[in-house]
Image (cartoon, helix red, strand yellow):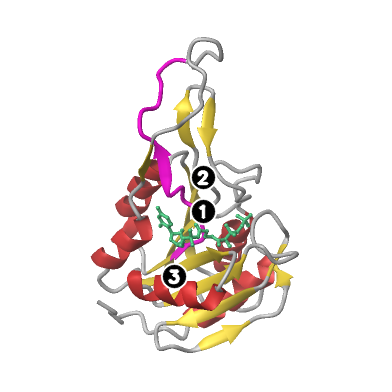
Amino acid sequence: FPRKDWSGRRVLISAGPTQEAIDPVRFISNRSSGKMGYALAEAARMRGAEVVLVSGPTALPAPTGVDYCPVTTAEEMRKALLSRFTWSDTVIMAAAVADFRPAHPSQHKLKKRHHPITQLDLTPTDDILQELGERRTTQVLVGFAAETEDLLAHAREKLHAKHVDLLVANDVSAAGSGFGSDTNRVVLLAADGEAEELPLLPKRDVADRILDRILTVPTARRTT
Ligand code: PMT
């Protein structure tokens, strides 16, 4: 890749799902494959950035040339990201972090006969992006929004609520877009209100377009 326009930048990227234990053999999770976040990590590295990739469980090989940090739960992902936050100048949250986890995970496998699981008590996880938004100093903060209806309205709410510079909105119910696919169709929403709609593209190309857009955000900018 001829362009080294990310040289000197330190990028923290999250990818994949998180898994929240019900018992030692069962968990709740989501359909994220990690492809979008890994594509971002690869693109940023190819363009010269130092990259830390914090990834939930995926079937993808760890990308070469990046500092790879595998995690399982939302809380592990939170800790991994917070511990590298001050190092970074850019954070991109492509992970699909679980919003809820079982409130009382069992230490032992729940037996179908003795403890049939007919209901689960859930408790909210911490919102990592929100926390980073509150703690940020000079970092550029980029979030994703996975929506199935009213894409732009919901994405705009998240852009402001989470104090991010850029929100990548994807309609995850559209064909060829969102979870699991090799392609994605996204709208880039900037804090200044500008919206850039991209066509359906391979995730690797979407990644480059996101990185292009981030370069236009001043690094010392604070939205809080
Ligand atoms: O992994 P792939 O199969 O390639 O699919 C890509 C993707 C659909 C997962 C990706 O493009 C995407 O949309 N990622 C964000 C999914 C998501 O959790 O969206 P959300 O609208 O629920 O969350 C909004 C933002 O807050 C996200 O940046 C998310 O990382 C962050 N978040 C959410 C919950 C939480 N507890 N902590 C967070 O930081």
Residue at disc 2, secondary structure = loop
Quadrant in which the N terminus appears: bottom right
Give how far apart the Cα atoms at labels 3 and 1 are: 14 Å
Residues under numbered marks 2 and 3 in contact, where contact means CB atoms less than 8 Å apart: no
Q: Residue at x 33, y 50 (%)?
A: 126
Residue 4 appearing in the image = no
Which one is earlier in the sequence, the residue at label 2 or at label 3? 2
Residue designated by label 1: 96
Quadrant in which the C terminus appears: bottom left
Label drawn at residue 142: 3
Q: Amino acid at mark 1?
A: Ala
Query: In this rendering, is residue 28 above or below 14?
Result: above
Q: Amino acid at mark 2?
A: Gly
Looking at the rendering, which quadrant does residue 150 occupy? bottom right
The residue closer to the viewer here, 116 or 211, is 116
Give how far apart the Cα atoms at labels 2 and 3 are: 18 Å
Which one is earlier in the sequence, the residue at label 3 or at label 1? 1
Q: Residue at x 49, y 77 (%)?
A: 153
Asked whether mark 1 and ligand 1 are closer than 8 Å, the reply comes as: yes
Asked whether mark 2 and ligand 1 are closer than 8 Å, the reply comes as: no
**Image coords of residue 80 (percent x, y):** 37, 47
Residue designated by label 2: 56
Which span of residues is magenta-colored? 92-108
Q: Amino acid at mark 3?
A: Val
The residue closer to the viewer here, 58 or 64, is 58
Residue 9 is a magenta residue: no
